[in-house]
């Protein structure tokens, strides 16, 4: 478990804001501001639950936080879960985000395991597509290049162009890249346009559809 | 048997004609036999940059339409041995020529010359396809800005589809000062995206403009950074191992400081 002050996770029942046990309200608010301003999509109108280990915040603090979330970010706080430090919370212990997003998929297609390996850099004006499975690309996707797969897309290089996973409508597909700095991501019918100026973060990232139908991008650790 | 190299870019105005003129001249100076071919039909200017405009009598169009022999259409550059120019017709349009006709000219030229350099027009249309039709290899010219890089990337894809190999990169108009200030994309950033072999870096050099206007390629006259960079590329083109010097991205004071810390 890393010790970020606040984290955002998409689970079966929606988005959860997880707050670190030992911090003040001020720190929480600053951390939320940092987290949300880094996000590549507005969460406006999304409902969210707050998870905390044995209340670091008083109930007054919590009220203030709720109003803050609603006022500043247009989030709807749908619940607060105070978890006992002793019992391993089922949510915090949830193994990987990927397996959760798979459970969450509404359409669960007959699972496609077919994968096409492409050993090429996809340059501006070029498209590579696999509509019968996933694509594993040994190379980069440059701005103006495009990769389309009915399954997942794994780029063992920099994804700087566009990628469309789950092109047959599967929302459980994911996009993984060593450097995820795309012009556009699409999973199923969801499109996400990241901010124009992005710096490679130096670690692989995964994009998937979280609860509430938004594309979530986060560090890729393992399946 | 020589080789045909197309010099192309996608984006206009990045230095294709300047590079063709200077590399052609530089190769002739190191004793290769060279023809430079203007494939920018309708907007010819290789002859102007070479200062040979007044001596052009026939063009590649006259050769294609059989009004004159190929050898007769070549204009000899009198400043250096074994350098010829094949000019483009100014009256015609790019789609008046078919790729097979350019290919035919290239095949004939490379039987007699070591290097045939083709100055491609900008764009990805017919004119580009004609220029690339007879090419064995390519040199991509780009400047360090996003739109030129994007166009270069597009062109590289098209050339790879044609099986043209190797494709080497020239980065033109790099300014160490701007890179250092963080206002220009660096050499490594360009290479990171385009992912082809770098054959040379030409610095921003005001001498280029002056030489363009005088009709004397830079490599003839001075030892400017631009001329030296073109000479090094020519040597790499004939297979010599000439390192690409790192442009000084440090200021003079930084360099002195580095020197002292290295020699402590
Ligand atoms: N290294 C350089 N430093 C300064 N100026 C340069 C440099 N290289 C090229 N230029 C200038 O840029 C202009 C365009 O160069 P050039 O004609 O060679 O480009 P081009 O790619 O052939 O253009 P076009 O696409 O129109 O054929 C010219 O005025 C030239 O003098
Ligand atoms: Mg030109």
Image (cartoon, helix red, strand yellow):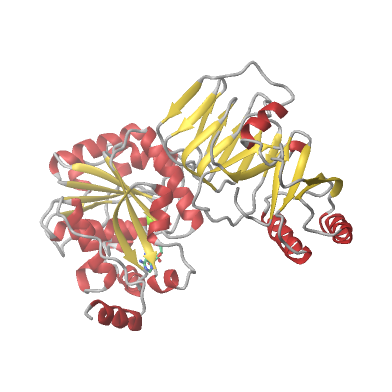
Q: Where is the N terminus of chain B found, in terms of image quarters? A: top left
In the image, residue A215 above or below residue B212: above
| Picture quarter with ligand 2 | bottom left
Q: Position of residue B203 (x, y in %)?
A: 34, 68
Locate residue A181, reporting x and y percent. 55, 48
Above/below status of B74 relative to B255: above
Q: Residue at (30%, 51%) from the top-left corner? A: B87
- In terms of depth relative to the viewer, which is nearer, A57 or B188? A57
Report the front residue among A13 and B59: A13
Instruction: Work out whether residue B93 or residue B4 is closer to the camera in this orientation and state it.
Output: B4
**Residue A177: image location, x then y, percent:** 52, 41
Q: Is residue B60 left or right of residue A178?
A: left
Place of residue B152 in the rendered image (x, y in percent of width and height, measured from the top left): 43, 49
The residue located at (38%, 53%) in the rendering is B191
Q: Is residue B183 left or right of residue B233?
A: right
Mark yes or no: residue B231 visible.
yes
Q: What residue sits 39% from the left and 70% below the top?
A: B175
Q: Quadrant of the C terminus of chain B?
A: bottom left
Give the residue at x 38% y 57%: B188
């Amino acid at each position: 478990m890393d010790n970020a002050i606040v984290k955002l996770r998409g689970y079966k029942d929606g988005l959860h804001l997880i707050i670190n046990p030992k911090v003040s309200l001020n720190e929480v608010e600053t951390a939320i501001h940092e987290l949300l301003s880094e996000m590549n999509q507005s969460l406006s109108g999304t409902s969210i639950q707050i998870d905390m280990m044995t209340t670091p915040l008083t109930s007054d603090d919590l009220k203030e936080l709720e109003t803050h979330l609603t006022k500043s970010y247009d989030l709807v706080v749908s619940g607060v879960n105070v978890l006992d430090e002793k019992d391993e919370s089922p949510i915090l212990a949830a193994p990987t985000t990927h397996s959760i997003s798979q459970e969450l998929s509404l359409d669960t297609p007959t699972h496609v395991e077919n994968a096409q390996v492409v050993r090429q850099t996809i340059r501006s004006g070029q498209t590579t597509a696999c509509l019968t499975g996933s694509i594993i690309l040994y190379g980069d996707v440059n701005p103006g290049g495009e990769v389309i797969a009915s399954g997942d897309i794994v780029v063992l290089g920099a994804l700087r162009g566009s990628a469309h996973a789950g092109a047959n409508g599967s929302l459980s597909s994911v996009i993984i890249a060593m450097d995820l700095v795309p012009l556009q991501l699409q999973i199923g019918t969801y499109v996400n346009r990241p901010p124009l100026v992005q710096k490679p973060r130096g670690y692989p990232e995964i994009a998937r559809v979280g609860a509430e139908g938004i594309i979530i991008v986060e560090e890729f650790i393992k399946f | 048997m020589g080789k045909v190299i197309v010099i192309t870019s996608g984006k206009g105005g990045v230095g294709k004609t300047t590079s063709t003129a200077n590399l052609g001249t530089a190769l002739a100076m190191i004793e290769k036999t060279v023809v430079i071919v203007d494939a920018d039909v309708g907007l010819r200017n290789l002859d102007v940059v070479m200062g040979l405009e007044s001596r052009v009598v026939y063009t590649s169009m006259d050769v294609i339409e059989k009004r004159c022999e190929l050898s007769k259409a070549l204009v000899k550059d009198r400043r250096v041995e074994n350098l010829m120019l094949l000019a483009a017709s100014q009256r015609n349009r790019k789609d008046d020529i078919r790729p097979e006709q350019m290919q035919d000219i290239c095949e004939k030229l490379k039987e007699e010359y070591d290097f045939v350099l083709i100055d491609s027009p900008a764009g990805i249309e017919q004119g580009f396809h004609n220029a690339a039709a007879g090419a064995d290899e390519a040199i991509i010219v780009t400047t360090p800005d996003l739109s030129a890089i994007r166009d270069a990337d597009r062109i590289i894809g098209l050339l790879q589809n044609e099986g043209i190999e190797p494709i080497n990169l020239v980065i033109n108009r790099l300014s160490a000062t701007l890179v250092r200030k963080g206002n220009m994309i660096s050499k490594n950033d360009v290479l990171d995206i385009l992912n082809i072999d770098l054959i040379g870096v030409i610095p921003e050099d005001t001498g280029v403009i002056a030489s363009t206007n005088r009709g004397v390629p830079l490599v003839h006259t001075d030892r400017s950074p631009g001329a030296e960079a073109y000479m090094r590329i020519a040597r790499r083109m004939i297979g010599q191992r000439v390192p690409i010097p790192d442009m000084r991205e440090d200021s003079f004071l930084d360099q002195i400081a580095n020197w002292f810390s290295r020699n402590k």
